[in-house]
Image (cartoon, rainbow, N blue to C red):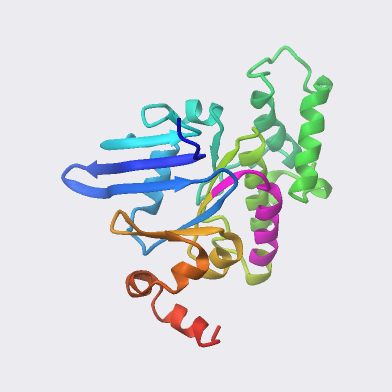
Amino acid sequence: MSTYALELKDLRKNFGKTEIIRGVNLAVQAGERVAVIGPNGAGKSTLFNLISGRFGPTSGDILLNGQAIQHKTPYEINRMGLSRSFQITNIFPKLSVFENLRCAVLWSLGYKYSFFKFLSGLKDANERTNQLLEMIRLDKKRDVLAVNLTYAEQRALEIGVTIAGGADVILLDEPTAGMSKSETSRFIHLIKEVTVGKTLLTVEHDMGVVFGLADKIAVVVYGEVIAFDTPEAVRANAKVQEAYLGSSVADSQAGGH
């Protein structure tokens, strides 16, 4: 049995005659934080959709903690310990911050759709929800409707919803997109804190976020992983510089910003 938290073996995905993912191999250790980078159209989102069960692969294997998941539904994969956020904020706008988080907590605690129970009496669910509120630093906004949060706060809430079920493998799709520099800096710290002990894969375009967050970087170009290594090794990889990072890496190596 595989010792990896997540492993992709010769993963391929075609849409008609067009090959989008072309034989991806990737092995992520438990507890690693991996940033998936690459130019637009490289196949990053398709890769996330395959891992999370939104798409089925044309061929190849996806192993979660050693168990094959390539033919399972998204909810089955979620119950096996993998949770995902999306590029577009995905929360209930007309529910409060607390209610959004509690909805995510209820299923993970086995309550499912037990409408006959009074939610206020579910001590374990409410305690877990309060813990999450503090973790994502929205405890002072607990009764605010999600629609009235700032954009960065909505993204923080979505991170809370994503981790609420206790998944040990977390996929974040461009979590800092649309944020200011100061918001992004705070969000990197938040992601680090809430994913301690968990395995993290994140698609990210902001190279400051990538180098500030990731233990390893997977570079995807034309549906293939052309490099998978530490940030330092990827930064120095000539093939990566030519394919994706370009002058920004040369500038940073020369001391530029």
Q: Is residue 43 above or below residue 7?
A: below
Can residue 206 be seen by looking at this rendering?
no
Q: Residue at x 52, y 39 (%)?
A: 5
- Given the current orientation, which residue lies at the most extreme top position? 116
Residue 17 vs 72, above or below: the answer is below
Magenta residues, start to end = 184-200
In the rendering, at what x and y percent does residue 231 appear? 51, 66
Residue at the farthest left position: 17
**225 left or right, relative to 124:** left
Residue 84 is situated, as x and y percent measured from the top left of the image, at: 53, 41
Quadrant location of the C terminus in the rendered image = bottom right
221 in the magenta segment: no
64 or 55, which lies in front? 64
**How many badges with numbers are in the image?**
0
Residue ID at (77%, 49%): 138
Residue 233 screen position, x and y as percent = 47, 68
The residue positioned 48% from the left and 64% from the top of the image is: 205
